[in-house]
Image (cartoon, rainbow, N blue to C red):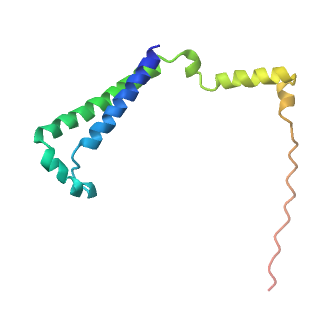
Amino acid sequence: MLYSICIGLILVASIILILAVLVQNPKSGMAANFGAANQVMGVRESANILERTTWWLSGIIVVLSLIATASMDADMNAGTSGLQKDADALIEKVGVTATEAMPQVEIPAAPAETPAETPAE
């Protein structure tokens, strides 16, 4: 339950973070030339508020990600154990043992090395 709540909050914070970054005035680069609209509508204090909002939202996303990871169920943390259980169940259903399921192939012996020919003088 806590995991789902954290994921939902992360999504909301991510969308707000994207919007906050898009509204900010570009500091330099090619996009700075297109920032004339911010001079007409923008206020100096709004840049500070947007920058603080960006930092706070990124920190919130990190903290919520850690909480979500810690609150995962054991089955979610196990990684491939669920896949292994499914594979074992399928092999058992077919009635084949694990060694028969994977055919064994003999590796041929390496050919004997022949001495390199010496170039004619």
Q: Would residue 80 be seen by someone viewing this image from the given angle?
A: yes
Which residue sits at x=39%, y=26%? Answer: 10
Q: Would residue 66 be seen by someone viewing this image from the given angle?
A: no
Q: Residue furthest left?
A: 44
Q: Nearer the viewer, residue 58 or 8?
A: 8
* Residue 82 position (above or below residue 54): above
* Residue 10 position (above or below residue 34): above
Q: Nearer the viewer, residue 103 or 65?
A: 65
* Residue 21 position (above or below residue 7): below
Image spot of residue 91 (x, y percent): 81, 24
Image spot of residue 97 (x, y percent): 85, 24
The answer to which image quadrant residue 103 occupies is: top right
The answer to which image quadrant residue 11 occupies is: top left
Q: Seen in the image, is 97 located left or right of residue 68? A: right
Image spot of residue 14 (x, y percent): 36, 32
Image spot of residue 17 (x, y percent): 31, 34
Q: Nearer the viewer, residue 14 or 114?
A: 14
